[in-house]
Image (cartoon, rainbow, N blue to C red):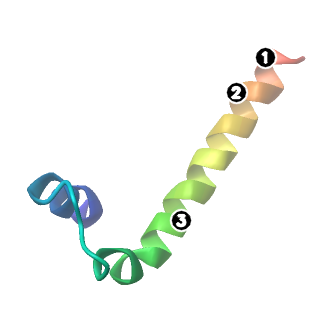
Amino acid sequence: TQLYAEAAQNPNPDYRYYPAHADLMKQRIQQAGVRLAAVLNEAFK
């Protein structure tokens, strides 16, 4: 995605990077949380 492409080009993003991608970062964090919940639910059945 654009997020990773930009991060690969510049491993030390400046202050403009985060506000420009905040919505996508929030979405990715939410998706990761759902995946983690599924793994934990399966592990603790």
Q: Residue 41: where, in percent of width, then height?
A: 82, 28
Task: Indicate the quadrant containing the N terminus: top left, top right, bottom left or bottom right.
Answer: bottom left
Q: Which amino acid lies under the numbered mark 1 shown in the image of this protein? A: Ala
Q: Secondary structure at mark 3?
A: helix
Give the spatial CA distance, label 2 vs label 1. Answer: 6 Å
Q: Which quadrant holds residue 15?
A: bottom left
Q: Which amino acid lies under the numbered mark 3 shown in the image of this protein? A: Gln
Extreme residue toward the left, this view: 9
Q: Which amino acid lies under the numbered mark 2 shown in the image of this protein? A: Val
Q: Residue 23: where, in percent of width, then height?
A: 48, 77
**Residue displayed at 62% across by 58% down:** 30
Q: In the rendered view, tell whether residue 28 sits above or below residue 43.
A: below
**Residue displayed at 56% across by 56% down:** 29
Q: Earlier in the sequence, mark 1 or mark 3?
A: 3
Give the spatial CA distance, label 3 vs label 2. Answer: 19 Å
Q: Residues within 10 Å of mark 2 (few under 14, many from 20)?
A: few
Q: Secondary structure at mark 1?
A: helix
- Residue 39's tag is 2
Q: Residues within 10 Å of mark 3 (few under 14, many from 20)?
A: few
| Residue receiving disc 3 | 27
CB atoms of marks 2 and 1 within 8 Å = yes
| Residue receiving disc 1 | 43
Q: Quick check: 42 left or right of 8? A: right
Q: Earlier in the sequence, mark 3 or mark 2?
A: 3
**Residue displayed at 46% across by 76% down:** 22
Q: Secondary structure at mark 2?
A: helix
Q: Residue 2: where, in percent of width, then height?
A: 23, 66
Q: Residues within 10 Å of mark 1 (few under 14, many from 20)?
A: few
